[in-house]
């Protein structure tokens, strides 16, 4: 069962990061908008191969969520979203969770590691905030918290630790809580 602290973080992820039109329901268009923001950032024009690749990757992320919500017979609202993560984080579902996290990390790196050097710079991480419409003013602090070895980059391994802390940790001071920016009254 999700703790209140986990619910608070996952609700932030739902409301601020994924529900782009802020209507309280996840839909394909929310994910399409994320893809379009990426295309604007990289100046990929509609009709080009690059544009279609980015949009298709974004829509594919929606399809993974959609399968779950359809099986549950419900709308992809915040309550259903919390149930999704509650089910995924239950003991015994580690294989499902790891598969989901692997997809999430690959998607983030495929989308924001622009120079394809295998790490995210502070600029690339800030691009993620802009594309997801997360308030940019906290991106530098979040980056510093997630860059555990202080080498001015975030590796896939560091991102994995951050994702685990964001979804699983009840430690309010865990750096991974900042994965998607400032989400509470904690500093």
Image: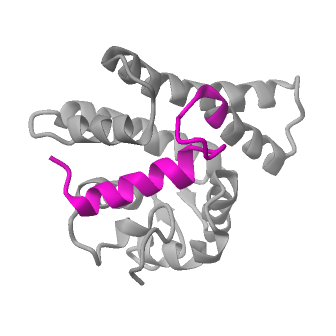
Nearer to the camera, 90 or 109: 90
* Residue 67 x %, y %: 41, 18
Nearer to the camera, 21 or 124: 21
Residue 109 shows up from this direction: yes
For the stretch drawn in magenta, the main secondary structure is helix
- Which residue sits at x=29%, y=78%? 173
Q: Identify the image quadrant of residue 45.
A: top right
* Residue 17 x %, y %: 55, 51
Nearer to the camera, 170 or 127: 170
Q: Identify the image quadrant of residue 137.
A: bottom right
Query: Left or right: where does residue 34 sit relative to residue 103?
Result: right
Residue 121 sits above or below residue 156 on the image: below
* Residue 151 x %, y %: 49, 76
Query: Left or right: where does residue 41 sit relative to residue 167?
Result: right
The question of residue 13 being in magenta is answered with yes
Considering the image in quadrants, where does the C terminus appear? bottom left
The question of residue 67 being in magenta is answered with no
- Which residue sits at x=45%, y=62%? 179
Query: Left or right: where does residue 176 sit relative to residue 47?
Result: left
Residue 156 shows up from this direction: no
- Which residue sits at x=62%, y=35%? 31
The residue at the far left in this view is: 91
Residue 21 sits above or below residue 187 on the image: above
* Residue 100 x %, y %: 35, 35
- Which residue sits at x=76%, y=24%? 52
The residues colored magenta run 1-30
Nearer to the camera, 150 or 133: 133
């Amino acid at each position: 069962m999700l703790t209140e602290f986990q619910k608070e973080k996952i609700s932030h992820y739902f409301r601020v990061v994924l529900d782009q039109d802020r209507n309280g329901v996840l839909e394909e268009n929310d994910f399409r908008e994320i893809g379009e923001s990426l295309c604007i950032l990289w100046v990929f024009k509609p009709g080009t191969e690059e544009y279609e690749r980015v949009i298709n990757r974004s829509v594919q992320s929606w399809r993974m969520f959609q399968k779950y919500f359809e099986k549950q017979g419900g709308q992809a609202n915040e309550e259903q979203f919390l149930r999704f993560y509650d089910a995924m984080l239950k003991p015994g579902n580690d294989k499902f969770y790891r598969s989901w996290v692997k997809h999430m990390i690959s998607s983030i790196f495929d989308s924001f590691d622009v120079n394809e050097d295998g790490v995210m710079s502070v600029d690339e991480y800030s691009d993620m905030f802009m594309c997801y419409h997360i308030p940019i003013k906290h991106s530098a602090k979040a980056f510093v918290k997630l860059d555990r070895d202080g080498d001015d980059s975030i590796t896939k391994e560091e991102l994995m630790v951050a994702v685990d802390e964001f979804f699983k940790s009840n430690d309010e001071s865990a750096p991974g809580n900042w994965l998607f920016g400032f989400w509470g009254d904690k500093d």
